[in-house]
Amino acid sequence: MNKYGSTTWFIPDGFIPKKSSGELESHEAICLLNSSKETAEITVTVYFEEDEPIKDIRFQVKGERTKHIRTDYLVGKDEKKILRGVPYALKVESSLPVIVQFSRMDATQSANTLMTTMAYAINESY
């Protein structure tokens, strides 16, 4: 197993606008890269300012593969989802080291904006 990446990542600034303009829909996504040969077991927790977290959202990323997931498609065990117009944050935990990137498509104006950044990796040696 290689050790590229981290097993815990945070994305503190999530927000999907309620309305979009034009043909594109505003959305956000996480992209995970698993460069090892083994399958990574992923658990996501969604945090909110006012509501209780959505916990235990689980999926897999096969070895030497990527997985792109729109955050509005994440669903908790009680069918709770991220609502548009509500600020949120994410914690991504993996059974083995992966790389996590966050992207936002803001289509609220005719001049669309695409932003992408690496998530914040926790250094397990702290």
Image: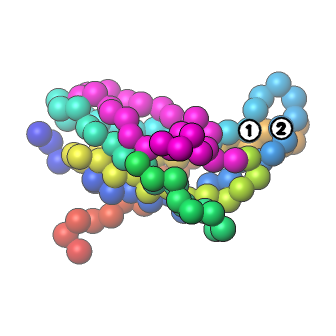
SS label for mark 1: loop
Q: Residues within 10 Å of mark 1 (few under 14, many from 20)?
A: many
Q: For the residues marked 1 and 2, what is the alpha-carbon distance in whole angstroms?
A: 6 Å
* Figure label count: 2
Please, which colouring scheme is shown? rainbow
Q: Is residue 17 magenta?
A: no
Amino acid type, residue under disc 2 in the picture: Ser
Residue 41: percent from left, percent from top: 28, 39
Residue shown at 57%/62% (left/top)? Answer: 52
Residue 112: image x %, image y %? 78, 39
Q: Position of residue 122 (x, y in %)?
A: 33, 64
Taking depth in this image into account, of 25 and 52 the one nearest to the observer is: 52
The reply to whether residue 20 is visible in this rendering is: yes
Q: Quadrant of the N terminus?
A: top left
Q: Which residues make up the magenta segment?
A: 57-83
Residue placed under numbered mark 2 in the picture:
20
Q: Is residue 70 magenta?
A: yes
Contact check, label 1 and label 2, Cβ < 8 Å = yes
Left or right? Give the position of 54 relative to 92: right
In primary-sequence order, the first of circles 1 and 2 is 2
Residue sitting at the far front: 78
- The image shows residue 33, relative to residue 24, as above or below, that is below
Task: Give the residue at mark 1.
Answer: 26
Helix, strand or loop at disc 2? loop
The quarter of the displayed image where residue 87 is located:
bottom right
As drawn, is 59 to the left or to the right of 68?
A: left
Q: Which residue is found at the position 51% from the left and 34% from the top?
A: 69
